[in-house]
Amino acid sequence: MFRKALINILLNNPMSIKELALLLDEHPKDIEDGLQHLQQSLRNLPYQMLIEPACCNKCDFLFQSNKLHKPGRCPQCHGTWISEPLISIEEDEANESRA
Ligand SMILES: [Zn+2]
């Protein structure tokens, strides 16, 4: 399982699912599933997942930040030149101070 590797790779290092798939030699769908499971298990760890939302390069429309994969097209200008969401993990300081 590559979830542990995902934490190490993404710690303070935002990457898209596509980049992760290439790096880990896994199918993007498996990366997305892994990230979703990881997001759940991070609740018990002093880390949090940050998702930099996808954004339209044409009109700067910002997509919802809870989506991990790249949207097909922009609802505003219907363009398809869309940057991928970037996923990263950072240490959860709020969690730490609570402990
Ligand atoms: Zn747009």
Image (cartoon, rainbow, N blue to C red):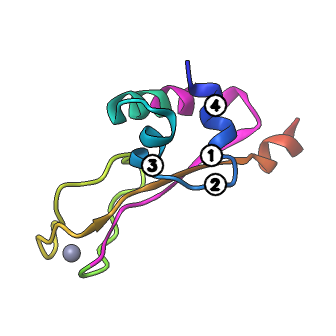
Where is residue 74 drawn, in percent x and y?
A: 18, 66
Q: Secondary structure at mark 1?
A: helix
Q: Secondary structure at mark 3?
A: helix
Q: Quadrant of residue 28?
A: top left
- Please report contact status of discs 2 and 1: CB closer than 8 Å, yes or no: yes
Amino acid beneath label 3? Glu
Name the residue that disc number 4 marks: 5
Please report the residue visible at 42 percent of the width from the left and 45 percent of the height from the top.
17
Q: Quadrant of residue 9?
A: top right
Q: Is residue 75 left or right of residue 22?
A: left
Name the residue that disc number 2 marks: 13
Disc number for residue 19: 3
| Quadrant including the C terminus | top right
Q: Quadrant of residue 95?
A: top right
Please report the residue visible at 15 percent of the width from the left and 66 percent of the height from the top.
75
Distance from Cα at disc 1 to Cα at disc 3: 11 Å
| Quadrant including the N terminus | top right
Mark 1 and mark 3 lie on one chain; the one further toward the N terminus is 1
Distance from Cα at disc 2 to Cα at disc 1: 5 Å
Q: Residues within 10 Å of mark 3 (few under 14, many from 20)?
A: some
Stretch of the chain drawn in magenta? 36-57
